[in-house]
Amino acid sequence: MALVTISGYPSSGKSRRAEQIRASLQKYLSDETYPGPIRKVAVLSDDVLNLSRSSYDDSRSEKPARGALFAAMQRQMSPDTILIVDALNYIKGFRYQMYCAAREAKLRVCTIYIVATQEQCREWNMTRQDGRAYAPETLENLMFRYEEPSSMVRWDSPLFTVLWDEEVPPMPQIWDAISKGTVKPPTRPL
Ligand code: ADP
């Protein structure tokens, strides 16, 4: 029913936000007044696919990793599912491809931009305890190449921006975009 694309710098808190969003959407779905047709929320990520962070160390290993993510995404798209793709999704052209695949499958879409400063990402990357840190050089390289989502292009719209110090993502608006497909996101200065 819907594709939720998460995008942001490496170690910016994407997985943490994806989990917040997943849990919150699950609550909306569990509400007995919600009539359907969506029945479940699924999260797809490099970790779910067992893709190592070192895949991003060079473009030769990154390409097949991205291909695997895209193929898994296409397999899991379904009219009764909200699919959250928790990955860097940092290339404009890749987000465009995801958008086209979602539209072809008649899914609603929204993009969630997780924002943290480069300094903050470096610190979180260095101190993460989950064995999923990026190599420092890879982190810098990915931040340098990062292509910011824009609400001006249709494949990133509607776009919701979540800043590092915000308690929770704007869930009512995200839920409306997914369940009704009508709501415009709030505009917020960066
Ligand atoms: P990503 O999915 O972007 O790589 P994660 O969500 O896995 O990022 O977070 C990377 C690291 O940063 C983790 O160790 C996480 O605990 C920490 N982190 C992320 N967001 C915050 C935050 N808002 N406050 C404190 N620590 C955070």
Image: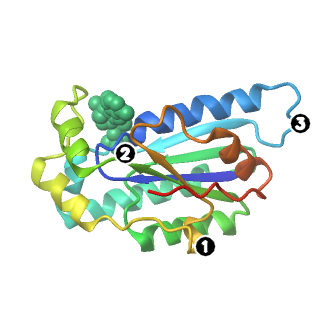
Where residue 135 appears, x then y in whole percent?
A: 13, 47
* Residue placed under numbered mark 2 in the picture: 46
> Which residue occupies 39% across, 41% down?
164
Q: In the picture provided, is 13 more to the left or to the right than 118?
A: right
Circles 3 and 1 in contact, beta carbons < 8 Å = no
Tell me the SS state at disc 2: loop
Query: Which quadrant would residue 103 be assigned to in this image?
Result: bottom right
Work out how far the residue at label 3 is from the one at label 1, CA to CA, in angstroms: 28 Å
Work out how far the residue at label 2 is from the one at label 3, CA to CA, in angstroms: 32 Å
Q: Foreground mark, 1 or 2? A: 1
* Residue placed under numbered mark 1 in the picture: 154
Amino acid type, residue under disc 3 in the picture? Pro
- Point out the image quarter for the C terminus: bottom left
Where residue 177 appears, x then y in whole percent?
A: 71, 52
Q: In this rendered view, identify the residue nearer to me: 55 or 134.
A: 134
Q: Foreground mark, 2 or 3? A: 3
Q: In the picture provided, is 37 more to the left or to the right than 161?
A: right
